[in-house]
Amino acid sequence: MKNSAGNESFFNAKGDSQPFFDLLYWHMTSSDTSSYLRVGTYDAKAPTGHQLTINRSAIHWGGKYTQVPRSVCSESCAPGHRISVAAGRPTCCFHCLPCPDGSIANQSDAIDCLKCPDHEWSNRERDQCIPKAIEFLSFIEPLGFIFVLIGIFLILNTIWVFWIFISYRQTPVVRANNLQLSYILLVALIMCFLCSFLFIGYPGRLSCMLRQIFFGISFSLCVSCVLAKTITVVIAFRATKPNSNLRRWVGSKTSYSIVLASTLVQSAIGVIWLWTAPSYPELNTKVTNEKMIAECNEGSILMFYCMLAFMGLLACVSFMVAFLARNLPDTFNEAKFITFSMLVFVSVWLSFIPAYLSTKRKYLVAVEIFAILSSGAGLLYCIFAPKMYIIFMRPEMNTREHIVSKSMLCNINN
């Protein structure tokens, strides 16, 4: 049908009209008058995609604009940024703020940034969450490799001392102060140096369960051997006095009983620890944002400190006994060397506790490895280096005649 202006009007099946519009462009002419210019049409009955037609060349933008002017006063925010509305300005005016660390915006003009999961972190562009790197003390990194070399060196040194003791087992300097205890101590030191390797590498369930237990038992065995050697020296000297009640304690049974009892107590602590709350591996995401720390959760920190406390008790008792016996008149008296070795041992582990509590990430493990190697080396060199010196540098002192003459001199002076 046609309307009053003579134009045809169309209706669809529902009786709704299908409009036809002209698009008019209002502009100022050169004579400062306004006029309307037809620049396009909208025909609802035209095929889809051809309903709107615009003659862009007919549009003349005024002033400085040669292209379509922007309808907003801010550029679009790129991915990795969020919109922050500018106070006191229209909503089309805003600031683009970068997403904080650990959150992303993966589309343009994002209103909020999305926080990454605990095991992921934002990339540099803040538009994608990527898996966090896993950090642990590796065998191939410089720090771990240095610890491995030091551990191997100390193990070889201990094996060499063991071989020297076996080769010179009939000499006085080796036989002095209980040869069998020296053998056990050297084996225990090898175990101590070996246990440091359990702390290096990616922590697994078995290594987490065994490393602290193995460390505690091996060091308790070391310190109990030192304590037994020291008590043996004291008993042997005191038993030489007339009517001494210590004669019945002279012999290897006393020293072996000390070693066995101390080791069993530490083993019991380890068994209780494994039974109640064993250590297990975990990925710690709270220490640092960019990385996950592969570490062993000790399970029960109380049992860990119980283990250290018992080992410290043995060391303190051994230090006090050795200190009291350091001046006993014996040619090969080990007490003064044991005193110094226990002083080194106690100093290392007293400094270990605050360092352990204040250190994070993989350096926490490095602190414990350093304490293991340095305290073990202190025991090895302070106790056995003087004997090696006599064997190789002063062989004239490693004779029965020297012992007899020295003992006679000591008796005269006393």
Image (cartoon, grey):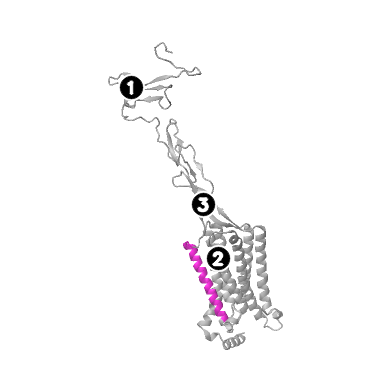
Instruction: Please identify the quadrant where the C terminus is shown.
Output: bottom right
The residue range painted magenta reads: 140-166
Q: Is residue 141 magenta?
A: yes
**Mark 1 secondary-structure assignment:** strand
Q: Nearer the viewer, residue 268 or 10?
A: 10
3D distance between C-alphas at marks 2 and 3: 25 Å
Disc 1 marks which amino acid?
A: His
State the image quarter where residue 357 is shown.
Answer: bottom right
| Vertical arrangement, residue 322 with respect to residue 272, above or below | below
**Mark 3 secondary-structure assignment:** loop
Mark 2 or 3: in front is: 2
- The mark nearer the N terminus, 3 or 1, is 1
Q: Residue at x 55, y 65 (%)?
A: 196
Disc 3 marks which amino acid?
A: Thr
Q: Which residue is mark 1?
A: 27
State the image quarter where residue 294 is shown.
Answer: bottom right
Mark 3 or 1: in front is: 1
Disc 2 marks which amino acid?
A: Ser
Image coordinates of residue 59 in percent, x first then y, are 33, 25
Instruction: Please identify the quadrant where the N terminus is shown.
Output: top left
3D distance between C-alphas at marks 3 and 1: 62 Å
Image coordinates of residue 313 in percent, x first then y, are 63, 67
Image coordinates of residue 210 in percent, x first then y, are 61, 63
